[in-house]
Amino acid sequence: CPSSPKPPDSPSEKCGVLNVTKITENGKKVRKNWTSSWTVLQGSIMLFAKGQGGGSSWFGGNQSKPEFTVDLKGGSVEWASKDKSSKKHVLELKTRQGTDLLIQSENENVISEWFRALQDTISTHACE
Ligand code: I3S
C-alpha cells in the first residue's frame, strides 16, 4: 500500500441529495424503503441526513438520531445489477458491517460522480 495515496490538503468530501434504501442490515435482508436523503461523504464515512419533514419513513428508521452513517473502509461499490432494482442509475454499496445500500439519482452525471468518489474513498482507505 502506498503510505499517502492522497495529499493531505485534498480530503474526499462530497455532498448532495440521493435516493437511498437499505437492502441488508447486519447481513440480513431488509425490505426496501427508498427515501430521498441529504448525503455527505467525509473521509471514509458516508452520512445520510434526514431532511425537513422526513418522518419515521426516513430510511434510518425510528432511531432517535437524525443521521445514519456507514463506514466505507473495507467496503465495495458497484453498479447494481438489474435484479437489484428496476430503477436507472443505481449503485450498490456494501459495507464491512453487513449493511448494504442502494443509492440512486435520476441524473446520470450525479450518480457517476458519486461512483468515482466512492471508489476513490474505498481505495484510499483500503489499508487502514
Ligand atoms: O426489490 P423489490 O421488492 O421489487 O423493491 C421494490 C419494493 O420495495 C417496492 O415497495 P413494496 O415493498 O411496497 O412493494 C418499492 O416501491 C419499489 O421501489 C422497489 O423496487 P425498485 O425496483 O424501485 O428498487
Image: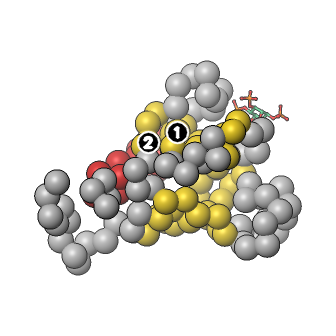
**Amino acid type of disc 1?**
Glu
Residues tagged 1 and 2 counted as in contact (Cβ below 8 A): yes
SS at mark 2?
strand
Question: 87 or 8, which is in the foreground?
Answer: 8
Q: Amino acid at mark 2?
A: Val
* Residue 1 found in image quarter: bottom left
User: Whole-Å distance between the Cαs marked 1 and 2?
Assistant: 6 Å
Find residue 94 and report its horizontal and vertical position in percent.
Answer: 51, 43
Residue 77 tag number: 2
Residue 123 appears at what percent x and percent y?
29, 51
Residue in the image at 55% along x and 59% along y: 70
Residue 63 relative to residue 104: left or right: right
Q: Earlier in the sequence, mark 1 or mark 2?
A: 2
Residue pictured at 52% horizontal, 31% vertical: 80
Q: Find residue 77 and report its horizontal and vertical position in percent.
A: 44, 42
- Seen at 14% across and 64% down, the residue is 3
Q: Which residue is mark 1?
A: 92
